[in-house]
C-alpha cells in the first residue's frame, strides 16, 4: 500500500484505508493482473458509490463490518478472497425504489473484475453470489456462498441497541415512503425470513446467531424495539 496519500486522497480516511488494504490483498491473492494505479482507480469509484448521501446503512461502514466478520470467521471459508470481493461489490449499486440493484451490482462486479484480471470462474461465482442476495437463498451447495449470505445478515443478530440503530438507518434510506406503508412492507420481508427453517446456513453461525436474530426480528415486527416517533426523530 502506498505510504503517501498525495495521489491516493481517499486513504486519509482510516476506514477507507483499511478497506483499500483488503482490496489490494485479496486482488493479489486472486492473481489479478493490474497495476496499483488501476487498482486504486477502480477502488475509488467503488467507494464513491458506498459514500452516496442517501446511504445510511449500506455504506462503507457496512462494508468494513462484513470484512471484519469475514476475517474473524475465515476458518469457516474455503476461498476467502472470493468471499471478500463478493462483499466489496454486493451493494455497489443501491438506488432507491429499484428492484435491479443486485443485478446491476453483479454486472458491475463481472465487468470490473474481469478487467482487473481476475479469473472468469471466480468472477462468475462472485456475480452469482451477489444475485443470490435478492432472496438470500444460496444458488448452489457452496459453503462459501452460504457463509457470504450469512455474513450479510449478521446484523440481524446484533445486540438490541445496535439492532435498533440498524432499524433507524434502514428507515432513513426509505424515509420518503409513508411510515405505515414502510412498516407493512418491512414486516412482510421480516416475516418471510422468519418462515425459513433457519436464517443462517453455516452451522457454526447458526448456533451463534440464530436465536438472537429471531428475537430481534420478532420484536421489530411487534413494534417493541422502535416506534413511529423514533423514525421521526431520525428524520423520517
Image (cartoon, helix red, strand yellow):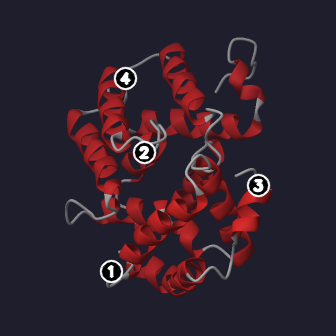
Please give the residue where the numbered disc 3 appears in the rendered image.
234
Q: CA distance from mark 3 to mark 2?
A: 26 Å
Q: Nearer the viewer, mark 4 or mark 1?
A: 1
Mark 2 crowd level (few <14, some 14–19, many ≥20, 10 Å Cα): many
Mark 4 crowd level (few <14, some 14–19, many ≥20, 10 Å Cα): some
Q: For the residue labelled by badge 2, is the local secondary structure a helix, a strand or a loop?
A: loop
The spot of residue 9 in percent (x, y) is 72, 19
Which of the marked residues, 3 or 2, is nearer the chain's N terminus?
2
Q: Is residue 190 above or below residue 104?
A: below
Q: Is residue 234 above or below residue 100?
A: below
Quarter of the rendering containing residue 203: bottom left
Identify the residue at image location x=49%, y=65%: 186
Please give the residue where the numbered disc 2 appears in the rendered image.
90
Q: Is residue 178 above or below residue 180?
A: above
Q: CA distance from mark 3 to mark 4?
A: 40 Å
The label on residue 116 is 4
Q: Nearer the viewer, mark 1 or mark 3?
A: 3
Res 200 seen here: no
The spot of residue 44 in percent (x, y) is 57, 23
Which of the marked residues, 4 or 2, is nearer the chain's N terminus?
2
Which of the marked residues, 4 or 1, is nearer the chain's N terminus?
4
Which of the marked residues, 1 or 2, is nearer the chain's N terminus?
2
Amino acid at each position: 500500500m502506498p505510504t503517501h496519500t498525495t495521489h491516493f486522497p481517499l486513504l486519509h480516511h482510516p476506514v477507507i484505508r483499511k478497506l483499500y488494504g483488503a482490496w489490494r490483498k485479496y486482488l493479489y491473492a486472486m492473481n489479478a493482473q493490474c497495476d496499483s494505479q488501476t487498482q486504486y482507480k477502480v477502488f475509488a469509484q467503488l467507494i464513491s458509490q458506498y459514500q452516496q448521501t442517501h446511504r445510511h446503512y449500506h455504506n462503507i461502514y457496512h462494508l468494513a463490518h462484513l470484512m471484519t466478520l469475514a476475517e474473524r470467521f475465515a476458518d469457516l471459508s474455503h476461498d476467502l478472497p472470493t468471499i471478500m470481493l463478493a462483499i466489496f461489490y454486493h451493494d455497489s449499486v443501491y438506488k432507491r425504489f429499484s428492484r435491479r440493484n443486485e443485478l446491476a451490482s453483479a454486472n458491475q462486479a463481472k465487468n470490473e473484475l474481469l478487467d482487473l484480471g481476475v479469473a472468469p470462474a471466480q468472477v462468475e461465482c462472485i456475480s452469482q453470489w451477489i444475485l443470490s442476495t435478492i432472496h438470500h437463498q444460496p444458488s448452489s451447495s457452496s459453503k462459501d456462498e452460504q457463509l457470504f449470505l450469512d455474513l450479510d445478515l449478521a446484523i440481524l443478530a446484533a445486540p438490541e441497541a445496535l439492532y435498533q440503530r440498524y432499524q433507524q438507518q434502514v428507515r432513513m434510506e426509505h424515509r420518503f415512503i409513508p411510515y405505515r406503508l414502510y412498516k407493512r412492507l418491512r414486516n412482510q420481508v421480516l416475516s418471510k425470513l422468519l418462515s425459513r427453517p433457519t436464517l443462517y446456513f453455516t452451522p457454526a453461525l447458526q448456533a451463534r446467531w440464530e436465536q438472537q436474530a429471531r428475537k430481534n426480528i420478532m420484536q421489530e415486527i411487534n413494534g417493541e424495539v422502535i416506534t413511529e416517533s423514533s423514525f421521526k426523530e431520525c428524520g423520517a
